[in-house]
Image (cartoon, helix red, strand yellow):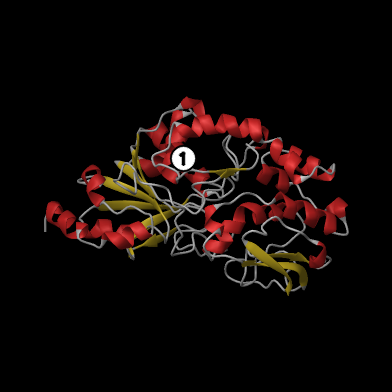
Amino acid sequence: MNVNFKLFFWSLVPLFIFTQNKSIDHTDLYLPYLENKKIGLVVNQNSKIDNIHLIDSLINLGINVKSIFAPEHGFKINYGAGEKIKNDSFKNIPIYSLYGDKKKPSPTLLKDLDLILFDIQDVGVRFYTYISTLHYVMEACAETKTPLIVLDRDNLNSNYIDGPVLDLNYRSFVGMHEVPVLYGMTIGEYALMINGEDWLSDSLKCDLKVIPFSKKNDYYITNSQLNDPPSPNLKTNFSIFLYPTLCYFEGTVISIGRGTDYPFQILGAPELDGAKISHGFSKYLSANEFSFTPKSRMESKNPKFKNKECFGLKFFLRDDSTYLKYNQIDLDLIISTYLAYPKENIFFNSFFNKLAGNSTLMNKIKLGWDSKRIRNSWVSDLNDFLKIREKYLLYKRK
């Protein structure tokens, strides 16, 4: 069966299912670049067209897939946060980890490849590490003159901009670029920004193509809900909505529910009183006092406060139709939890500044700044970022 016939066959797969996932639905835009080439893929278990994995789709189309590169959590999304990932194989294709000691593909791994194809579902938050993997893949491709194609995907936060812009003194794998926590872009748009703003080392340029997930020039970003978890502890769209706020608590003494059925939907600690906590999500959510006991499980083998009962809050949707229309970091929740904790002197740890991308947010909370004053301090940097972002948007926003 020749490639052109296979392409025609796959074009008949229902478009509705593809666009419902807000992922690539038109192989005709990128297949010509892959024909008769040795291809490396940066993918995980969610890199699907319909319910068929991209690897299977390409193999069925006669594409020569030589290598697979996996981000944090591994190809099968079965490793917890920060967990070391072993190299593996899938259908006799070697899988190389891009997390841990070797975050960037080596020239040796790229030397026999003609092109890299990147297809990872992002969530639009700076400290979510898939965009850091994207950076290192782009850098490796630029260094070896290997072309890179990014298959774009929408995400739940691609309309929202909020949070402090990263101070490069706090650059790390959970924040590499001068962007806010919520940067309001798809991963394809973000790749264009990395290249266009000379953020790769030595101002290298990657031979980059972004394949949009919609052929419509007037396509509006709609904050697509996901059908599959993008990582082990973001189990629901609701947890992705809460993630930009609750992830800050990873830099504190507070648990956000790792080791439970509700990661990134609850918070608590053994010495916390949930009744003393207020939050700013009231338009969309309600929160009840809640207790939980983290246990070791696949996605969190050693959770904070393992086997200890914690007390705090569990969040619930108040209106399913409105919460997706707006999202921002709930500073009131962070501040009130800090004030409610009986030992303020041990509330924060050093990871908080990496997540915040600065030391000023922690200092302002300790000094008693309210959420409005803190958010006003971000305005100038956010306005500067908006001017940069505008240059790389592929889709309209309402």
Q: Is residue 169 left or right of residue 270?
A: left
Residue at 22% in and 60% down: 60
Observer able to see residue 234: no
Residue at 65% in and 53% down: 245
Q: In this view, does 233 lie to the left or right of 278?
A: left
Image quadrant in which the C terminus is located: top left
Q: Position of residue 397 (x, y in %)?
A: 44, 43
Q: Mark 1 Cα within 10 Å, few/some/many (few <14, many 20+)?
A: many
Residue at 63% in and 31% down: 381
Image quadrant in which the N terminus is located: bottom left
Q: Circle 1 sits in a helix, a strand or a loop, which is it?
A: helix
Residue at 61% in and 52% down: 244
Picture mark count: 1
Q: Is residue 327 above or below residue 284?
A: above
Q: Which of 391 and 305 is in front in this view?
A: 391
Q: In this view, does 388 lie above or below 277?
A: above
**Quarter of the image where one finds residue 62:** bottom left
- In the picture of the structure, the residue carrying the numbered disc 1 is 190
Q: Where is residue 11 in the image (x, y as percent from the top left)?
A: 20, 57
At label 1, the amino acid type is: Tyr
